[in-house]
């Protein structure tokens, strides 16, 4: 029985898949401050035009440049594993597969979009990139990409993660990136928030505001902003995960997938694995596709579908998405990459169309699942990934109860070797669960009052 299913470099996909043209209900446009749809020119100070073209593209397939493919070959195609030991421990008739994105140099799925974003910016004549990072995965990935293509990278890292994960900063610095705790005194929005909340743990929304401000205020015009999740072109680049997975399953004649699972914060890891399977579902396949989020940040499971800003400082366009409100400050759970107030518009649209079945799980169950996975499959997963592992275990147990030989595929979005503090706190019984109440959600979404409503 195969443990890992491999592809050759020649078998790596040559195109990315764009879900937008296949959605049953057309995407609603981003809006400007006046409530009117924005055009590409309004995004030009923030992103290079070649990426803006991908952001608004209605093409189903977009070619991956040969130069980008060559850089991705440093670790791609990534292996697909059969979780034989986990299956045995659970006594399940289900066959469990996981796509291992932890094999990238940065240890996660994030370089799948960091590499093309850096390359397209370089082609456009950009010299510096700014960005934000939650757990540090994205900041590490973009620093790595900047080193490969020759760009300066400045990263605003959510303060609680900056404190919890010091070696992430070292990783960024090793690749030449500059890492700043957010909120900081280097931007106007950062100084304003520090004056109001000097002890804030920070948030991705705040860090995004700082990174966007730093990009658009550069007098040289040679700086742009880079986002690691949420936007359409980021989802696009990540679909290489699911496209490879489908090829690997076909190699072993695993022709029917029943369940596809990915953790979801902004949506890039989940979308990367799931969107090629969402296309199959649109075309009639019966697949349960599950994005998993923390119970303490229930964007998909409790928040409304609304127009909201992507950042706390209201510098981004208004986007149609599930959102807890742009002023939401999540509890300092260890899954820092899943603490964003919104969800990708494409993922939100797929939920709205009934193509996805989101769920939320508390962090203690997630750590329990991660430890069982480590003691069977051997990999210590990132706190974010533990949500996918926990959901996969739930689905495997359900298959056992139903007596069905289901095929379950989940995304192993990154390893947890830089995130062991959370494991340490779990073993010391210092972790607590927090599930947002309806009253807390109602209070949080008040920041969206007065904003335009989606159709």
Image: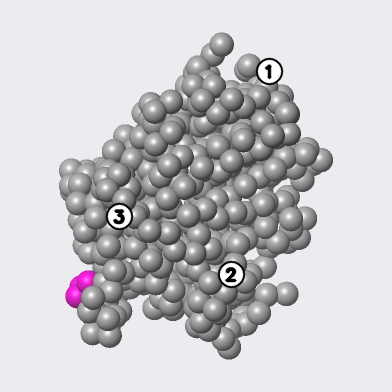
For the residue pair 53 and 125, the one nearer the viewer reads as 53
Is residue 311 shown above or below 362? Answer: below
User: Between tags 2 and 1, which lies in front?
Assistant: 2
Marks 3 and 2 sit apart, C-alpha to C-alpha, by 28 Å
Numbered disc total: 3
User: Between tags 3 and 2, which lies in front?
Assistant: 3
For the residue pair 362 and 109, the one nearer the viewer reads as 362
Residue 230 numbered tag: none
Q: Where does the N terminus fall, quadrant-wise?
A: top right
Question: Badges 3 and 1: C-beta atoms under 8 Å apart?
Answer: no
Q: Is residue 237 left or right of residue 184?
A: right
- Write the start and end of the magenta stretch as one range: 184-188
> Extreme front residue here?
429
Label whose residue precedes the other's in the sequence (3 or 2):
2
The residue identified by callout 2 is 303
Q: In terms of secondary structure, where does tag 3 sit?
A: loop
The residue identified by callout 3 is 430
Judge whether residue 110 can be spotted in this image: no
**Horizontal and vertical percent position of residue 385:** 44, 43
For label 2, the crowd category at 10 Å Cα-Cα, with few meaning under 14, some 14 to 19 and many 20 or more, is many
Question: Badges 3 and 2: C-beta atoms under 8 Å apart?
Answer: no
The residue identified by callout 1 is 253
Is residue 32 shown above or below 305? Answer: below
């Amino acid at each position: 029985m195969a443990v890992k299913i491999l592809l050759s470099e020649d078998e790596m996909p040559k195109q990315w898949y764009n879900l937008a043209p296949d959605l049953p209900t057309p995407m609603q446009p981003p809006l400007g401050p006046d409530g009117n749809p924005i055009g590409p020119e309004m995004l030009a100070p923030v992103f290079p035009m070649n990426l803006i073209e991908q952001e608004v593209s209605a093409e189903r397939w977009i070619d991956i440049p040969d130069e980008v493919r060559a850089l991705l070959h440093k670790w791609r195609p990534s292996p697909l594993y059969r979780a034989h030991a986990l299956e045995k421990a659970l006594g399940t008739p289900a066959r469990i597969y996981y796509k291992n994105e932890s094999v990238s140099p940065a240890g996660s799925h994030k370089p799948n979009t960091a590499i093309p974003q850096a390359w397209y910016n370089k082609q456009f004549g950009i010299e510096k990139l700014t960005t934000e990072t939650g757990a540090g995965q994205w900041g590490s990935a973009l620093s790595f990409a900047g080193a490969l293509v020759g760009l300066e990278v400045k990263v605003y890292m959510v303060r609680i993660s900056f404190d919890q994960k010091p070696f992430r900063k070292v990783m960024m610095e090793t690749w030449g990136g500059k890492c700043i705790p957010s909120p900081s005194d280097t931007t106007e929005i950062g100084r304003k928030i520090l004056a109001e909340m000097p002890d804030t743990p920070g948030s991705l929304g705040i860090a995004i505001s700082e990174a966007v401000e730093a990009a658009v205020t550069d007098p040289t015009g040679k700086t742009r902003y880079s986002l690691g999740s949420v936007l359409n072109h980021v989802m696009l680049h990540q679909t290489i995960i699911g496209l490879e997975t489908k090829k690997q399953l076909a190699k072993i004649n695993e022709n029917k997938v029943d369940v596809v699972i990915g953790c979801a914060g902004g949506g890039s890891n989940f979308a990367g694995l799931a969107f090629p399977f969402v296309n199959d579902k649109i075309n009639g396949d019966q697949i349960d596709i599950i994005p998993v989020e923390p119970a303490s940040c229930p964007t998909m499971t409790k928040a409304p579908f609304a127009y909201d800003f992507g950042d706390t400082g209201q510098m981004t366009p208004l986007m149609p998405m599930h959102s807890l409100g742009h002023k939401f400050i999540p509890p300092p759970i260890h899954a820092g990459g899943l603490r964003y107030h919104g969800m990708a518009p494409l993922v939100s649209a797929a939920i709205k169309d009934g193509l996805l079945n989101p769920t939320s799980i508390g962090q203690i169950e997630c750590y329990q699942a991660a430890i069982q996975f480590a003691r069977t499959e051997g990999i210590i997963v990132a706190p974010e990934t533990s949500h996918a592992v926990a959901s996969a275990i739930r689905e495997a147990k359900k298959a056992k109860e139903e007596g069905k030989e289901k095929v379950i595929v989940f995304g192993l979005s990154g390893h947890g070797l830089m995130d062991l503090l959370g494991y340490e706190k779990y073993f010391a019984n210092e972790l607590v669960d927090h599930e947002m109440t309806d009253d807390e959600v109602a209070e949080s979404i008040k920041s969206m009052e007065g904003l335009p409503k989606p159709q």
